[in-house]
Image (cartoon, rainbow, N blue to C red):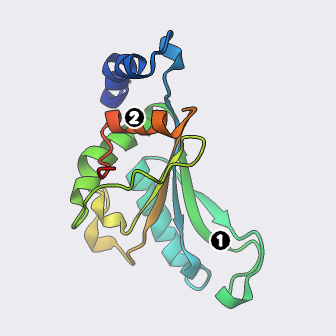
Amino acid sequence: MATPRLLERYRNEIVPELAKRFNYKNRLEAPRLDKIVVNIGLGEATQDIKLLEAAQHELALITGQKPVVTRAKKAIANFKIKKNSAIGCKVTLRRAMMYEFLDRLISIAIPRIRDFRGLAPDSFDDRGNYSFGLNEQMIFTEVDLDKVMKTHGMDITIVTNAKTKEEAFELLKLLGMPFTKR
């Protein structure tokens, strides 16, 4: 299996650039991606299980990996959710699959978002992880538009081993994430 092009770029260009900016003495001090979690929450799936099956199929097409069904931890009467009922699905990507997905997200999917002005640079948590949401799954070219039952969004969390928000921001910026100007 060939090495993903984003991983090659990370090793050859981004690590030396980060080492120069943050004065790392060793290449291994540079922050790197640990995993990417893609999550779809469908509260309506309690009434119609076909929505959940369709979302699972689409998420499998988008990520190239079979999703895990997420279940409700407790009952919420106002939303007609019973304990342990299926309410969504998620995929955790690591290693080569993670870099392939991030490459497709940055270079193909995000430019297809209507009226896109950039991702918010302030969505980092204290540990250097970045989370953002997408409003519709149809920006991915893998999804067949004729077979979409219902449009739904997804949450994407990029987990890094960066020590600070600034290091994580620089890592993702160098990887090509289209942030708005600070």
- Quadrant (top left/top right/bottom left/bottom right) for the N terminus: top left
Where is residue 175? Give x, y as percent. Answer: 34, 35
Q: Mark 2: which amino acid?
A: Glu
- The residue under label 2 is 170
Q: Residue furthest top?
A: 25
Quadrant of the image occupied by residue 170: top left
Q: Is residue 96 above or below residue 82?
A: above
Question: From this viewpoint, is residue 103 visible?
Answer: yes
Identify the residue shown where x is 30% and y is 57%.
140
Report helix, strand or loop for mark 2. Answer: helix
Identify the residue shown where x is 48% and y is 60%.
155
Q: Tell me if mark 2 has few (under 14), some (14-19) or many (20+) residues whose alpha carbon lies within 10 angstroms of its own.
A: some
Mark earlier in primary sequence (1, 2): 1
Residue 86, numbered circle: 1
Q: Nearer the viewer, residue 136 or 70?
A: 136
Q: Measure the alpha-carbon separation of dots 1 and 2.
A: 37 Å
Identify the residue shown where x is 35% and y is 24%.
14
In this rendering, would 82 be left or right of 111? right
Where is residue 18? Give x, y as percent. Answer: 40, 23
Q: Nearer the viewer, residue 13 or 73?
A: 13
Q: Is residue 10 above or below residue 130?
A: above
Q: Is residue 55 above or below residue 45?
A: above
Q: Is residue 157 above or below residue 175?
A: below
Q: Tell me if mark 1 has few (under 14), some (14-19) or many (20+) residues whose alpha carbon lies within 10 angstroms of its own.
A: many
Report helix, strand or loop for mark 1. Answer: strand
Question: From this viewpoint, is residue 2 visible?
Answer: no
